[in-house]
Image (tube, helix red, strand yellow):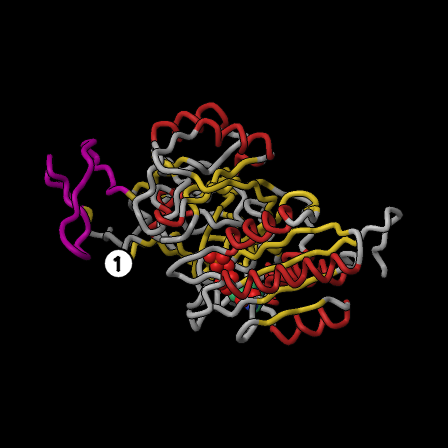
Amino acid sequence: MNNHNFDNDFSVYVGIDDTDSASGMCTTYICCVIMDRLISCGFRVDGPPRLIRLNPFAPHKTRGNGAVSFKIVLKSKKEVEQAKKIIRDMVGNLAVMGDPKTNPGLVFYEGKITPELQDYAIRTIRTIVSQEEAEKLAGNLGADIFKYKKGRGVIGSLAAIGCPLTDATYELLAYREPANYGKKRMVDEDSVLGMNQKTYPNTFDNVDDGYMTITPHTPCPVLYGIRGETMGAVEEAHKLVKVSEPIEFFRVFLTNQHTDMHLQNIDAISNMKQFQCYIVPGTVRTQPVVIEGGHVIFVLEDESGEVECAAYEPTKKFRDVVRHLAPGDQVIVYGGIGNKGTLNVEKIKITSLAPVYEYLNPICDCGKRMKSAGKGKGYKCPRCGSKMPTGSEEDVEVREKREIERMIKPGFYEVPPSARRHLSKPLVRG
Ligand code: ATP
C-alpha cells in the first residue's frame, strides 16, 4: 500500500466522467450526490471536489468537456471496498445510460499523483488521447477502472485525478429540485448584477454587458454557477443571489477553469495541429473581412507558414478589434484550431501596429484638390479645369500619401464572458 499514511488511513482518488447527455443530467451533480451518500455513510471526503475541463476540441464531448474527481480517506481496506461498491452502483444508476453517446468511466486510484499521471492529464487537456492509452496508464499505475458501456469516460476520469492545479479557480454550482429540470430558471437578474458589483473581480464572468451569465441554457440540474478566485468569494456571492425556486443543494468545486491550461506556446505556425490550442505570435497578412454570419476572418503568418484566424459572431464586440487589424500588425493570438483548420481566437495581444496610409488625389496649382478624370485618365481640377494627364488612380506617386489614425491600440483584447471558453483565462485574472 503506497499511500498508507501514519494514521493508517487509506486515501482513494475517485474520477468520474461521461455520465450525462445533451438531454439531461450533469457529471458534477452525480459527483455531489455520491459524495453526500459517502458522507452520510460515515466516510470522509477530503477537500472540495475538482471540476477539470479537458480539451475543448475533444470529439465526443457533450458540452464543456468536464470531468470530476474527489478524494476519500478511509479507515480500512474493508471501508475502501464498501465505498467503491457504493460509488460503482451510484454511477451505474445515475448516469444517462439510455443515451448511446453516454459511455461512463470510473477510476479509483490509491497511489501518489506521479509526474507521468500529471503529464497524461495535461495531454488530455491539450491534445486528443486514446482510451487505450488511458487504460494502459491506469494499469501501469495500479488504478482500478470501471467501464459502463464503452467506458470512454475513463479518459477524463483519470485526467481529473491527475490534473495538477498550480493555478486554479472555484465554481459554486447550485442545483435545482428535479421537478424543475427543463423549466425556466427563476434567478433574479438584478440580484446577480448587484452581486457582480460587490464581488468583482474576486468573482468574474458572471455578468456580460449588463446580463447575467450564471444560468446555463440546457435542461441540466444546474440552476447557476458562480465563478471566482476563492471559495470564500463564490460563497459570499452565492448569498447575494436571489432565486424564486428551491435550491436542492450547492457545492463549490476547485477547478482548472479560466487558467489557460489548454494553451501551448508555439513558435512556428506550421507546427500547430488541429484540435489543439496555442499562444502563437505572427504578423497579420490580410485585411480582416466580415463573412456571412458576421464572423471576422484574417490570415496570420510567420516565416514557417500561415493560418486563417476567426473571431466568430458570438464574440460580439471583440470582432470590432479584430476587424480593425491591418496587414503588418504584429500580434500574439490565443486560440484553438477547430474542425476546419481555422484558429478560433480567444484573446489577442497586439504588440505593434503597422502604419496604414490613404492616398489622396493630388492638389492642383490653384490649391484645390483634383478629381479623377475617369479610370486611367488622370486628374482634373474642379475649380480651374487644369488636367494632370500623366497621373492615374493607380499611380501612387502623384497622389498625396497620408497616414491614417488607427482605430485600435496595442494591448490585450479578449472575447466577452458569454463567448469565453471554460478554460480561457480572463484578462482580469492577470
Ligand atoms: P459535460 O460538460 O456536460 O459534463 P462533457 O462535455 O464533459 O459533458 P462528456 O459526456 O464527459 O462530455 O464526454 C466527453 C468524452 O470525451 C469523455 O468520454 C471523455 O473521457 C472523453 N475525452 C475528454 N477529453 C478527451 C481527450 N483529450 N481526448 C480524447 N477523449 C477525451
180 horizontally vs 261: left or right:
left
Q: Quadrant of residue 207?
A: top left
Reply yes or no: does residue 366 show up in magenta.
yes
Location of the C terminus by quadrant is top right
Dominant SS type (magenta)? loop
Determine the residue positioned at 77% across, 59% down.
115
Q: Disc 1 residue type?
A: Glu
Of all residues shown, which one is farthest toward the right? 6
Q: Which sits in the foreground, 138 or 208?
A: 138
321 horizontally vs 391: left or right:
right
Callout 1 crowding tier (Cα within 10 Å): few <14, some 14–19, many ≥20: few
Location of the N terminus by quadrant is bottom right
Of all residues shown, which one is farthest toward the top? 198
Instruction: Report the residue marked by disc 1.
Output: 292
Determine the residue positioned at 77% across, 60% down.
78
Q: Quadrant of residue 68?
A: bottom right
